[in-house]
């Protein structure tokens, strides 16, 4: 081998990277201590960016296409090396290829429930799961803030940090949305769009762009889920008293249609009938709730446990004080201004002549005898 071939073998005249992986973010071109020939061909493919680094300082950055490395198209490197125009000598520089394609189907999920304050349920703990996609948008920032000078850098090295950052702000994002916990399942698209907007500043710090973000599931602890199901069922049932009446009538019908059992069945049927009769009586005279008899509040009509002195809904007294109408003697509520039977005014009359206050129901003044 001639001396010229040996010297030629020490120079690099073609620089390119064919990515055959699915998770490589950065690839350093292996120069093996070879110098780059002035005028070398740099080929950058679609979804790639090439970055020239001189002694740890980022110099020129090249997008997709074929580039000839000369002083004419390496302005920053030419300045850093203080080259004069027309410099022809080989030079040493590190070449990094940065992938700018989207890295998709990156998963996130809460390892432990995160707290969130809901207007209906108060403080609850939730779990969230979903996927996101990202890509390198600013290769220079990414190299300075994340990559450094490693030979290769894969998504595995950064996705854990991104995943933790997403989870740390998940509860804030859900709370800021103002969407009740019961409605979140129908609002995943809206929540995902809001989350993507909130998380983008985190990705900006590393020269990345959050291209896609999808919340796939939000769940609550089992005990909270049971409470939510119970509330939903109550909302569907509507009037609890009517529902209790319907259930009782349905149970009586089912018992009447039960033809099996002989004498034992008859005995059971009689016992069930008696129990149902008591239940029906309870429904019409006072609702049964958890073994407790419920009565109706005279003020607002709410169901209140029998024996309570005040209604928990309106605060009104459960026992109504009685009085007699001054005109007809009918029973009426104490303090009422008019009789519900005859309409007579119940206030004590004042004499128009002498101004004396007389007994309620009096027709003549007790002081001057004038007509009231």
Image: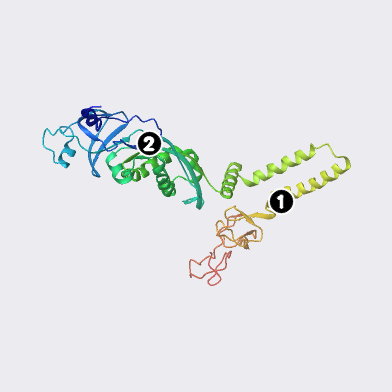
Q: Quadrant of residue 295?
A: bottom right
Q: Nearer the viewer, residue 185 or 169?
A: 169
Indicate the secondary structure of the residue bearing disc 2: strand
Residue at the extreme right = 263
Residue 370 pos. (x, y %): 53, 67
Horizontally, is 265 left or right of 65 in the view? right
Query: Which x, y percent locates residue 303?
Result: 62, 53
Q: Residue at x 23, y 34 (%)?
A: 36
Q: Position of residue 71 (x, y in %)?
A: 15, 34
Query: Which is more toward the observer, 127 or 133?
Result: 133
Q: Is residue 261 above or below residue 42?
A: below
> Would you name the residue on which mark 1 appears?
282
Q: Nearer the viewer, mark 2 or mark 1?
A: 2
Marks 2/1: CA–CA distance: 73 Å
Q: Quadrant of the N terminus?
A: top left
Q: How is the image coloured?
A: rainbow
**Residue 223 visible in this rendered orientation of the protein:** yes
Q: Are marks 2 and 1 in contact (CB under 8 Å)?
A: no
Q: In this rendering, would 166 be left or right of 328?
A: left
> Residue under circle 2?
24
Query: Which label was assigned to residue 78?
Result: none
Please indicate, yes or no, whether residue 68 appears anywhere in the rendered image.
no
Q: Position of residue 18 (x, y in %)?
A: 34, 29
Q: Residues within 10 Å of mark 1 (few under 14, many from 20)?
A: some
Mark 2 or mark 1: name the one nearer the start of the chain: 2
In front of the other: 172 or 259: 172
The residue sitting at the left extreme is 85
SS for callout 1: helix
> Neighbour class for label 2 at 10 Å: few (<14), some, many (≥20)?
some
């Amino acid at each position: 081998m001639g001396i010229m071939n040996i010297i030629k073998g020490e120079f690099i005249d073609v620089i390119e990277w064919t990515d055959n992986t699915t998770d490589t973010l950065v690839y350093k071109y292996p120069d093996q201590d070879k110098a780059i020939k002035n005028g070398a061909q740099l080929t950058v493919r679609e979804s790639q960016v090439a970055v020239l680094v001189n002694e740890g300082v980022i110099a020129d950055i090249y997008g997709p296409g074929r580039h000839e490395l000369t002083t004419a198209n390496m302005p920053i490197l030419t300045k850093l090396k203080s080259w004069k125009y027309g410099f022809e000598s080989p030079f040493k520089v590190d070449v990094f290829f940065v992938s700018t394609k989207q890295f998709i189907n990156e998963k996130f999920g809460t390892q432990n429930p995160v707290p969130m304050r809901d207007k209906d349920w108060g403080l609850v703990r939730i779990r969230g799961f979903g996927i996101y996609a990202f890509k390198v948008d600013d290769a220079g920032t990414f190299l300075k803030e994340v990559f450094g000078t490693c030979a290769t850098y894969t998504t595995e090295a950064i996705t854990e940090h991104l995943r933790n950052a997403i989870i740390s702000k998940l509860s804030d994002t859900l709370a800021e949305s103002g969407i009740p916990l019961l409605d979140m399942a129908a609002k995943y698209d809206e929540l995902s769009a809001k989350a993507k907007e909130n998380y983008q500043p985190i990705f900006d710090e590393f020269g990345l762009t959050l291209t896609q973000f999808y919340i796939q599931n939000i769940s609550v602890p089992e005990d909270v889920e049971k409470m939510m199901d119970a509330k939903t069922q109550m909302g569907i049932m509507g009037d609890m008293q009517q529902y209790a009446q319907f259930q009782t009538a349905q149970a009586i019908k089912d018992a009447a249609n039960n033809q099996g059992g002989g004498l034992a069945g008859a005995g059971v049927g009689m016992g069930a009938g008696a129990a149902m009769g008591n239940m029906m009586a309870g429904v019409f005279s006072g609702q049964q709730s958890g073994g407790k008899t419920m009565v109706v509040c005279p003020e607002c009509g709410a169901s209140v446990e029998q024996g309570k002195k005040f209604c928990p809904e309106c605060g009104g007294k459960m026992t109504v004080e009685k009085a007699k109408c001054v005109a007809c003697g009918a029973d009426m509520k104490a303090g009422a201004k008019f009789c519900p039977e005859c309409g007579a005014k119940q206030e004590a009359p004042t004499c128009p002549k002498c101004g004396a206050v007389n007994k309620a129901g009096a027709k003549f003044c007790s002081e001057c005898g004038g007509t009231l």
